[in-house]
Image (spheres, grey):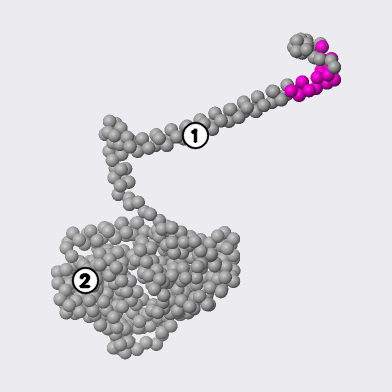
Amino acid sequence: MCRVDRSDVKSNLREPKRRVSWEMGLKVFGEGRVEKLRNTVLPHSSRSRMKVWMIRATTTVLLWTCVVQLTALGETWGPRVLLGLPSCLSQESAVLDDKASAVPVRVLPPKRVYKNNGYLMISCNGGLNQMRAAICDMVAIARHLNVTLIVPELDKTSFWADPSDFHDIFDIDHFITSLRDEVRILKELPPRLKMRVDRGLAFQMPPISWSDISYYQHQILPLIQKYKVVKLNRTDARLANNGQPLDLQKLRCRVNFSALRFTSQIEELGRRVIQLLRKNGPFLVLHLRYEMDMLAFSGCTQGCSDAETDELTRMRYAYPWWKEKRIDSIQKRKDGLCPLTPEETALTLRAMGIDRNIQIYIAAGEIYGGERRMASLAEAYPRLVRKETLLESSDLRFFQNHSSQMAALDYLVSLESDIFVPTYDGNMAKVVEGHRNILGSKKQFCWTEGFWWG
């Protein structure tokens, strides 16, 4: 057997002219040795690539370790280093530190995991506190049915004609996150379902008033499972107050007194009103429910002229969802179902021993009859104030023609008042009284079925 010498191989590599013949010789006599050469070169190449990859990976880990360490050192030594910098920088740092420490760290509740049975949309109706109570009911219903709730739509077509959306009045992110351990809430439907709703293909219906939760379990849930999306287009007083499961009742309270927080703009202005009132001593909030819509709805026309009575009657017939049309004002008054007039309010406050010199904040819209009907109350209690008299017009320019946002200001002031006195057992009276009880607030007088108690 012919043997190929190493020196021959080296000389052949140095001599190009003999390369072809040498390669042929290798094919014939030295295929095994060539294969051995290949096996020695290829692993060396792969090892080189592996070494480069390891260097890169190690460098990346070291760089990230340095970043983490520098961040930790910056948090520890940053303020001390800034002490040696110019005063403008150190002052700015101090302001930022103060702001950071002033913001409380909020721990979100864990998400509740459940099989989603569909999506529930709701369209609220009425004034602020009527819609507020409806939202509490609908959150509890969505929780009970294991469905996803879409952020509620607010009423824009009623007497108040307020164009505000949910996020204009309430802190929408707080509403969603604070209830995540109870129910999943979305700002809008998923795109595919939203397209169906936009084309008018969603199933809509008004639920039956004062229904038990079993009605929603047996009547509404099957519809949600069938259509995937159901919209309840009237939600006021659609869930019975009493006889419901305890967990459901607790959730209604939690929504009302914790999850439904007003926007920062509204709360800031509310704090300013309260500060202005506190500068002048204790104050009483009088929820004087004597606006045009209240009188038209209730049919209570005590003290109104014939022209005013006719105007209120026409208004009552103009709104088809106000079911009661023919009303005996005198009989309704005897039954204790009418709001106190401003004149009666003055007499009642004196009878309760309310100091004549106390500040009285009128938490209400425009009083029907204006100054003529307010004359006796102003004479008995001369320190009457309203948000419009306490604040500059520029402060309220964003709230003009937004009755629900104005009502939100009144709500905040009512919570902080020394005494709260409603003149009608309506939605605001009930919600504020409950909220003040939760907060352990000061004295309040309640008007129920024609009787005062406090």
Indicate left or right for 262 with 370 as reference: right
User: Overall secondary structure of the magenta stretch?
Assistant: helix
Instruction: Please indicate whether residue 279 sits to the left or right of residue 196 in the image.
Output: left
**In front: 401, or 267?**
267
Q: Is residue 435 visible?
A: yes
Element at label 2 = loop
Quadrant in the picture for the N terminus: top right
Residue 125 appears in the picture as rendered:
no
Residue pictured at 32% horizontal, 46% vertical: 100
Q: Nearest the camera: 442 or 45?
A: 45
Query: Where does label 1 land, which residue?
Result: 61
What numbered label is drawn on residue 443? 2
Task: Pinpoint residue 76: horizontal percent, then vertical percent.
Answer: 33, 37
- Percent from the top left, x then y, of residue 29? 83, 19
Numbered mark located on residue 254 in the image:
none
What amino acid is found at the position of numbered circle 2 in the picture? Answer: Lys
At a point 41% along the width and 85% down the height, the residue shown is 325
Q: Is residue 30 magenta?
A: yes
Neighbor class of circle 2 (other Cα within 10 Å; few <14, some 14-19, many 20+) is some
Q: Nearer the viewer, mark 1 or mark 2?
A: 1
